[in-house]
Image (cartoon, helix red, strand yellow):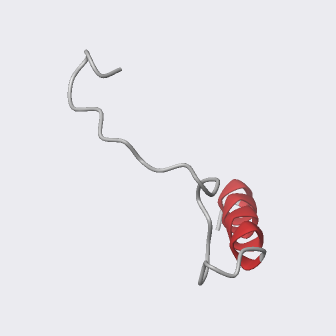
Amino acid sequence: MESRKKWILNSFEMAGNQNKLNKHHQLWQNGNYPVLLYSADVI
């Protein structure tokens, strides 16, 4: 496994373990949600 990949997965896992709502990993901050950008007007 590449060292960068190992580092980022470890970072996600550590963040996920600090939040009891997560099971394994956390990819973004709590309160932030993905938004579908369906056209250039939305961006």
Residue at image position (21%, 23%) is: 39
Image location of residue 19, percent across then percent down: 72, 74
Tell me if residue 7 comes above or below residue 39 in the rendering.
below
Residue at image position (78%, 74%) is: 18
Name, please, the residue furthest toward the left.
39
Residue at image position (71%, 54%) is: 4
Q: Which quarter of the figure is the C terminus placed in?
A: top left
Compared across the picture, whether 32 is left or right of 6 comes to left
Q: Nearer the viewer, residue 33 or 12?
A: 33
Image location of residue 14, percent across then percent down: 77, 71
Quadrant assignment, res 27? bottom right
Tell me if residue 19 comes above or below residue 30 in the rendering.
below
Number of marks in the rendered image: 0
Compared across the picture, whether 6 is left or right of 30 comes to right
Residue at image position (30%, 40%) is: 36
Image location of residue 42, percent across then percent down: 29, 22
Q: Which quarter of the figure is the N terminus placed in?
A: bottom right
Image location of residue 22, percent across then percent down: 61, 78
Name, please, the residue furthest toward the top.
41
Quadrant assignment, res 13? bottom right
Tell me if residue 31 comes above or below residue 38 in the rendering.
below
